[in-house]
Amino acid sequence: PQTFYLKDYTPFGYDVESVHLTFRLAPETTRVLSRIRFAPKPDAAEKTFFLHGEDLQLISVKIDGQDVKPRLVDGGLTCEVPGAPFTWEAEVEINPAGNTALEGLYMSNRMYCTQCEAEGFRKITYYPDRPDVMSTFSVRIEGDEPVMLSNGNPMGQGEGWAEWHDPWPKPAYLFALVAGDLVNYPGSFTTKSGKEVELNIWVRPGDENKCAFGMEALKKSMKWDEDVYGLEYDLELFNIVAVDDFNMGAMENKGLNIFNSSCVLASPETSTDANFERIEAIIAHEYFHNWTGNRITCRDWFQLCLKEGLTVFRDAQFTSDMRSEPVKRIDDVITLRARQFPEDAGPLAHPPRPEQFQEINNFYTATVYEKGAEVIGMLKRLVGDDNYYKALKLYFERHDGQACTIEDWLKVFEDATGRDLQQFKLWYSQAGTPRVKVSEDYADGSYTLTFEQSTPPTPGQPDKAPRVIPVAVGLLSPNGDEVRATEVLELTEAKQSFTFDGLASKPVPSILREFSAPVILERDTTNAERAFLLAHDTDPFNRWEAGNALAKETRVAMVLDGAPPDTAYLDALEKLVRDDDQDPAFRALVLSPPSQADIAQTLHERGHTPDPQKIYDAAETFTQTLAQQLETSLPRLYAAKTVEGPYSPDAVSAGKRALNGRLLSLLTRLDGGEQAVRQYAAADNMTQQYAALAALLKAEKGEVQSRAFFDQWQDDRLVMDKWFALQIACAAPEKTAATAKALTQHALFDMKNPNRFRAVFGALAGNHAGFHHASGEGYQLLADNLIALDKLNPQTTARMCAAYQTWKRYDAGRQSLIRAQLTRIANTEGLSRDTNEMVTRILD
Ligand code: DPP
Ligand code: ZN
């Protein structure tokens, strides 16, 4: 397979002045007629006229009205073309109904829809399918569908046709078309300059009652982007469509966002608090792309984090503003450590701006998205808030309408602030998570912190240079007062010291406040000091972090030395959980133990081979001990945290329900499930129904409720995804693979639906002890299904291969079991480019 390199970038030799597309819809034989105005660039270095095209049946091509015969080549066509501007007209036939890869134009539940990012447009017609080629699009759709949508503004419609025009030049990956039997949930928004924007969420009939929350989220996003970034919407219409079969979460097509239905449809009866929060964030994310992604796009796909890192950063700011800033930060760090740190520490490690790929779909990763956002957070911290917004203003002024690079992005910060970002740029080019070792020294009122940074080798990058690392530090006195407020220390060297003078006594440091950089902090400290910070730190993130570190230390000691759970930690937890002055959401977070995968990751970072079964046993013992410790107060605490009255998804109520749910899971360990059964029966919302079912399944006491849940929700796809996933997530290690396997034989298991596939296999891979059970059944079951899915949907298959990425950290037995499965996948006849690249990298 061909490898593409960042260093090989050359511009396309032709400008595209306009694109006219006509679609004659038919499920298996859709005709696409394109009329494209090309103009040769006078100064082009590359004159070859190459258009991408895949899975297209070419009917005819004309240049300036004359038939021509292009040469079909691998991945597209080339053609002799005039040296002056010309009109290209092509007719192709495609088969949306047969398109199970869900890239290009495909059908989902009899609805036509598209997904063109990253390189799906080439499956619609021949085109220079690269983000730096931007043009206006006019679209005519012919067909019998009641609703037929495309980007931009409606230009007219009649019996069997509809026409659209998007006045904003865009790359082909932002093209979209939807046609089907849809109903709209309407809304409107008046922009800050007084323009009326019509809003719609389009859904299948029956789903109208699940749109209200998404519509409010959209309006809040539009307002927030005006208030915080000064950015206004730029069309008269903004459409969102919910689609059941979708490889990603959602897609920011200009004026016509297409969403995985799981990321937009919400109702109290069918969605959990976590679903509501996620939906709000994704609607915001896609809306924010209108400026960071669409108006300013990427020059090439190596620059993907230019739009994704920035847009994730923006949606995190939005969620912090709408909800709780510390809780959002803690949630994000948990996710970063769960998804990005393992990636950065294994065979798939790559920098936020990769320098090579075979299949770009394999780089929609936690590193590009989440680490990409962390890099922007560091930049903001280093230059300060005012400079950050000054630089962003310059970015929008300077680059509106352009396809840009990371260099363009950093240059606006350099120009706006006068700062040299040469060294900072290493964050974009170096892979791996830096480790920062801290030591301290105190004498005569002077306190010195010494930092040493290093980054382990990653594939293709044996040596790393020191980076700029902003470390936010505060100092507390031994009685718990803050003696030095947060300041940002800038590490730039491999080893560096910072001294704080004039202290009355040796302080307790609070380091890496707000998780000011995506690094692994290494410091010898005591559990007593961690407990002190958990009680006294003024930085909420670091308070949580102290509790998290305590939890990890006690669990690691249990795994490695067979130690009993640390009593000081249990006492600290008990105190916190009873402390009603503390935010319930925060208490729920402190009360949620680190995941077993997180313990495995920690053991690995410290040079141990994780034993999944021992990690599981330690988790069980710990939770059981905690439940017993809280025994006398649990029923009262649980009752006090029950949220009464009609359901509302707001952050405060959600926080109370989160704490209540944690307490229920502990209580279920003591009362044989009595309370959970009651809660299940009484629940009028999915959050409480789900929490009760989860507690019961975990205790192997949920059979009746699981059946009832199925009976109640079997016609609701999204709720059924929960039912599939939860049974696997809650299964004991020795039963996990068998549970998953049985569910793949269920009548409602549908491999072609990515949500259902991910529900089952995401849950399997996420059940650490179950997936890594020594029998190897989990490894094999996943491989069987990846091999089967690859023939239908390479993109989703390839992404799920990442479940194996940590394989080298386990014992020899597990390694050889996984290697055998990866090799079996790699040797599969006709394996897709996507999956081949992933398994090859993982095996390397
Ligand atoms: N661009 C989409 C998103 O991240 C994914 N293709 O919003
Ligand atoms: Zn995005």
Image (spheres, helix red, strand yellow):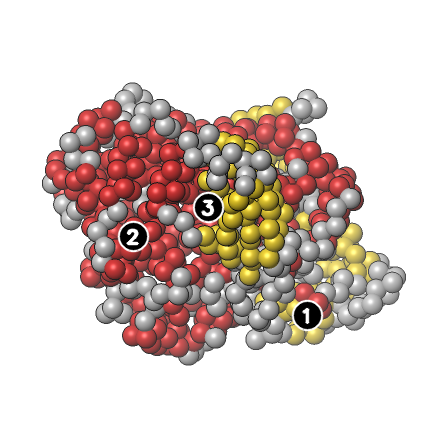
Q: What secondary structure is marked by label 1? A: strand
Residue pointed to by mark 3: 333
Is disc 3 in contact with disc 1, using a CB cutoff of under 8 Å? no
Callout 3 environment at 10 Å: few (<14), some (14 to 19), or many (20+)? many
Q: Mark 3 against mark 2, which lies toward the viewer?
A: 2
Viewer-side residue, 350 vs 449: 449
Tell me the number on the disc at residue 453.
Answer: none
Q: Mark 3 against mark 1, which lies toward the viewer?
A: 3
- Residue 136 screen position, x and y as percent: 72, 47
The quadrant of the picture occupied by the N terminus is bottom right
Callout 1 environment at 10 Å: few (<14), some (14 to 19), or many (20+)? some
Residue pointed to by mark 2: 555
Give the amino acid at mark 1: Leu
Mark 3 beta carbon near ligand 2 (under 8 Å): no
What residue is drawn where x is 39% and y is 73%?
Answer: 822
- Residue 274 screen position, x and y as percent: 38, 38
- Label 1 – label 2 distance at C-alpha: 59 Å
- Label 3 – label 2 distance at C-alpha: 19 Å
Relative to 463, 754 lies left or right? left
Q: Earlier in the sequence, mark 3 or mark 1?
A: 1
Give the amino acid at mark 3: Val
What residue is drawn where x is 45% and y is 70%?
Answer: 842
Tell me the number on the disc at residue 77.
Answer: 1
Relative to 54, 82 lies left or right? right
Q: Earlier in the sequence, mark 1 or mark 2?
A: 1
Viewer-side residue, 367 vs 208: 367
Give the amino acid at mark 2: Arg
Q: Is residue 634 visible?
A: yes
Q: Earlier in the sequence, mark 3 or mark 2?
A: 3
What residue is drawn where x is 78% and y is 52%?
Answer: 17
What residue is drawn where x is 20% and y is 61%?
Answer: 734
